[in-house]
Amino acid sequence: MAVETIAPTGISPIAGIDYLSSRVLPEPDVFIHTSSGERIPAHTSILASVSPVLENIIDQPRRHRSSERIIQIHGVPCEAVTAFLGFLYCSRCTDEQMEKYGVHLLALSHVYLVPQLKQRCIKVLAERLTIENVVDLLQLARLCDAPDLYIKCMKLLTNHFKSVEATEGWKFLQKYDPWFELEILQFMDEDESRKKKSRKRKEEQRLYAELSEAMECLEHICTEGCTDVGPYGVELRNERRPCSKYATCHGIQLLITHFARCSKRMNGGCLRCKRMWQLFRLHSYICQQTHSCKVPLCREMQMKMQQVKRKDDPLWKLLARKVTSARVMSTLSLPKRKRDDEIRISMDNYRIRSFKLKR
Ligand SMILES: [Zn+2]
Ligand SMILES: [Zn+2]
Ligand SMILES: [Zn+2]
């Protein structure tokens, strides 16, 4: 390209850009006119190679071939234009230029399609977000199609809305752009319902994980036996240390013990008996080994399910599927048992005949 081979002209084509003096450049063949009336010499070959928009402008036929080529860049301070041209020439901007003209550089990089500069501006502006400038930057992010910056602004605005409401930027926006104000308020509202949904989902997942563990413990108690409850013919391990899921096992053992001894029973309105029955029922939906299974009522319930098409079947099936997937997830990730205390609290609420109970 001509730019590299032609001898230096001895002048820096762009005032204030020192690095150009060390480069070998041809005579400038275009002038950038700024709002303040400055004329900054530049090179069409360089401008066109970095910005497709400037390339388009340069390619447009001139009225007189002899006339000077001029490109108008108005609406931003002259220094911002200098910094912009500096970036076009050597892909760099000083921190000071970014600090002072980041906003203008973002606008210029958007208008003239210079993605590298745009990304740099977005990063710098996002780091400098404050309650005072958030409304201005939000508007800019929207105008310049910068979704990352837009979301960051929205989040800050949502989290500190009371303070943002008091800023000049917000008052100005309310007065002159009520549609945008509405857009912001809508985002905040949706954000709140998103958070609610995510809290609800986490809570559900926790419940399914708890139920999944309860199912595991129920099988373990009914097959191997734990400290206080176990099947006939198996020695209870009261002299052994509690099993690894003892927090849950303990709660289920209490529930089984109660179920075996309660005189009120489920039909008498006993809530604990009802809970135990629900755990048996859930097990029968999940159980894969009907014939060898030692969990009480498992076979009876499965036979009944085959005979009668219950109305609530889809709900129980869905629950069983979610609990099974929670079990698969837990065997995949094996989290630390930090939730033991939580599980103990929730399992204490559940308090379960064919059992050997410790006296
Ligand atoms: Zn156990
Ligand atoms: Zn009871
Ligand atoms: Zn079973």
Image (spheres, rainbow, N blue to C red):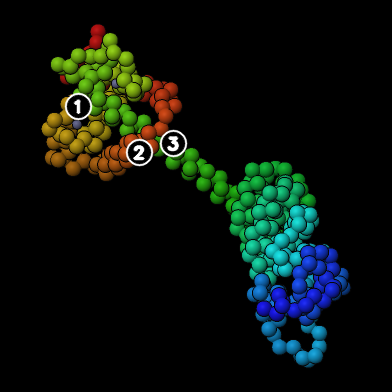
Dividing the picture into quarters, in which one does residue 289 lie? top left
Disc 2 vs disc 3: which is toward the camera? 2
Circles 2 and 3: CB atoms closer than 8 Å: no
The amino acid sitting under disc 3 is: Glu
Label 2 near ligand 1 (CB < 8 Å): no
**Disc 3 secondary structure class:** helix
The amino acid sitting under disc 2 is: Leu
Instruction: Locate residue 230, reporting x and y percent.
Output: 21, 18
Please give left or right for residue 45 compared with residue 204 in the image. Answer: right
Q: Which numbered disc covers residue 203?
A: 3
Marks 1/3: CA–CA distance: 28 Å
Please give left or right for residue 329 compared with residue 197 in the image. Answer: left
Q: Which numbered disc covers residue 295?
A: 1
**Label located before the other in sequence (1 or 2):** 1
The crowd level at tag 3 (other Cα within 10 Å; few <14, some 14-19, many 20+) is few
**Label located before the other in sequence (2 or 3):** 3
Q: Which numbered disc covers residue 332?
A: 2
Marks 1/2: CA–CA distance: 25 Å
Q: Does residue 234 appear in the picture of this structure?
A: yes
Instruction: Locate residue 116, reporting x and y percent.
Output: 64, 63
Residue at 24 percent of width and 37 percent of height: 286
Dividing the picture into quarters, in which one does residue 142 lie? bottom right
Give the camera-side residue of 219 and 353. Answer: 219
Residue at 67 percent of width and 58 percent of height: 120
Dividing the picture into quarters, in which one does residue 86 lie? bottom right
Q: Does residue 82 appear in the picture of this structure?
A: no
The crowd level at tag 1 (other Cα within 10 Å; few <14, some 14-19, many 20+) is many
Residue at 41 percent of width and 37 percent of height: 204
Q: Which numbered disc covers residue 53?
A: none
Label 1 near ligand 3 (CB < 8 Å): yes
